[in-house]
Amino acid sequence: MPPMPPMPPLPHDSGPPAPPLSLAEVEATARAAHAGQTDKAGRPYAEHLRAVAEGVRRRGGDAEQIAAAWLHDAVEDDALTEGWLAEAPLSRRTKDIVLALTKRAGEPTEAYAARILATPGARLVKEADLAHNADPARLAVLDGATRTRLTEKYTRMRALLGQG
């Protein structure tokens, strides 16, 4: 019996895997994906991403966690798709952290927190995210009702993550 011919490469398989994106490339990707977006206070959204990435670094996070910090809201905010994330030249761990931090529509907060706790490296990124979100200077520019609602939301999430 003659040998089987080799299988043709998949259309997206163009040889060896691409090297992982550098942190500078991840930052540029995140900034481009969120271009034109603002936070609740009307500030450019990239400021929040930078603050979370810096918070992860200050807390001793590694490059994979810092990359996830830059991308932590990208899928949730529809700035990038899950398909993009799946194909992106990023470590599996970075992708897992981003997916863990992506809150799904209608998802109970307890389930969201449990997924973060179950994903290695995700809790530190969420801690940095919550710290920036709950920064009194950021909250001070919001109306009273929004400030109260968000403060309660962030306090509850910190408690669920054992950061009470």
Image (cartoon, rainbow, N blue to C red):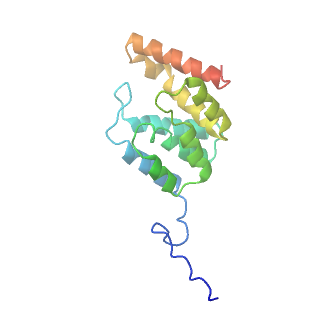
Quadrant housing residue 98: top right
Instruction: Point out the residue furthest to the front here.
Output: 1
Quadrant including the N terminus: bottom right
Residue at 52 percent of width and 73 percent of height? 15
Spot occupied by residue 106 in the image (x, y as percentages of width and height): 48, 27
Residue at 62 percent of width and 34 percent of height? 115
Quadrant including the C terminus: top right
From the viewer's perspective, tell me whether residue 27 is left or right of residue 120. Answer: left
Quadrant housing residue 159: top right
Foreground: 29 or 119? 119
Instruction: Point out the residue furthest to the left here.
Output: 36
Spot occupied by residue 94 in the image (x, y as percentages of width and height): 58, 48
Foreground: 114 or 8? 8
Spot occupied by residue 37 in the image (x, y as percentages of width and height): 34, 36
Residue at 54 percent of width and 44 percent of height? 68
Reply above or below: 68 against 90: above
Tally of marks: 0
